[in-house]
Image (cartoon, rainbow, N blue to C red):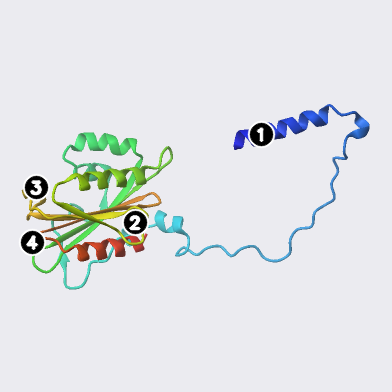
Amino acid sequence: MALGLVAGTCAGYLVQAGRTPDKLPSLSQPTLAQAAGEGPVPLSAAQDHQVKMDGDLRKLLLKRPGGTRANPAIDSDDGWLDVAAYAELYTKPDGAFRELLGDEFRRAAVTGWIESGDRTVEIRLVQFRQVEKQTAIDRAADARHWAADDAHTRSWPVPGTGDGEFFVHDRPDSRFGPGYQAEAHAWRGDIVMEMWVYGTKPIPPARVRELARQQMERL
C-alpha cells in the first residue's frame, strides 16, 4: 500500500511536468481556517494503556488475598526479577538467558502466596521491548503449546483474552513440588502473564480460572 501511494504521487508529478505552462494549475491555495473548539481531552493515566504498562509493573500484579501468607519459594525480595533471575527459573538457564536477550527482555515482576492448606500460587508478569518483533504473543503461544503437550491435562480459555488458556494437570508429578500443578498463560500488549498453582491435591479448575481472569483484568 505504501509503495502504491508513492508511485501514484510520482506519476502525478510527471503528468504535471509534461504540460505546457499555460495549462498548469495555480499553486496558490486559499488560506484554510482552523476548526473552532478545543482539542480532545488527553487520556488519564488510568485510561491510557501504555502509561499503565510503562509504570510500576508490580502494581499490575494481583494483590495477595486476605487469609493467605507469603510464599517463601519466590526468589525476589522486592517483587522484581531481572533477566538473570528470570532465566534461572528455566531448566537450562544459560540458554534461556541468551534467548531472553534476543527476545528483547525488558523486566519481570512476581508475586505469590500460600492459600489454605498447602496450595501455593505464583504469578509473573514478563515485559518485552518489542522493537524488532512481537515477542509477547509468541512466548505466550509457546508456553501454551508446552502445557497442552503434557499428558493428562485439561485446558480452558481465560475469560477476557483472545487466546489465553489455563491448564490443569490431573496426574501428580514430583517435578511440580507437592505433586499437582495448574498453570495459565496469556498476553496483553508487550506483557506475558504466567501463573502457576501447586498443591498436594488436584487443583480446582474454577480457582485457576478466577485467578487468571482477575489478573488479566488488571492489564
Q: Residue furthest bottom?
A: 67
- Name the N-terminal-most of marks 3 and 4: 3
Which residue is disc 2 drawn over? 57
As helix, strand or loop, the secondary structure at mark 3 comes to helix
- Name the N-terminal-most of marks 2 and 4: 2
Measure the alpha-carbon separation of dots 3 and 4. 15 Å
Q: In front: mark 3 or mark 4?
A: 4
- Mark 4: give few (<14), some (14-19) or many (20+) Cα within 10 Å: some
The quarter of the picture where the N terminus appears is top right
Q: In front: mark 1 or mark 2?
A: 1
Residue 166, quarter of picture:
bottom left
As helix, strand or loop, the secondary structure at mark 1 comes to helix
As helix, strand or loop, the secondary structure at mark 2 comes to helix
**Hey, what amino acid is under mark 3?**
Arg
Which residue is disc 3 drawn over? 175
Which residue is disc 1 drawn over? 6
Q: Position of residue 149 (x, y in %)?
A: 19, 44
- Mark 1: give few (<14), some (14-19) or many (20+) Cα within 10 Å: few
- Name the N-terminal-most of marks 1 and 2: 1
- Name the N-terminal-most of marks 4 and 1: 1
Measure the alpha-carbon separation of dots 2 and 3. 29 Å
Apparent side of residue 218 relative to residue 143 in the rendered image (left or right): right
**Hey, what amino acid is under mark 1?**
Val
User: Are circles 1 and 3 on residues that touch, CB within 8 Å?
Assistant: no
Q: Which residue sits at x=60%, y=37%?
A: 2
Relative to residue 82, is residue 204 depicted above or below? below
Which residue is disc 4 drawn over? 201
Measure the alpha-carbon separation of dots 1 and 2. 42 Å
Q: Which residue sits at x=26%, y=47%?
A: 144
Relative to the observer, which residue lies in front, 197 or 79?
A: 197
Residue 86, quarter of picture:
top left
User: Are circles 4 and 1 on residues that touch, CB within 8 Å?
Assistant: no
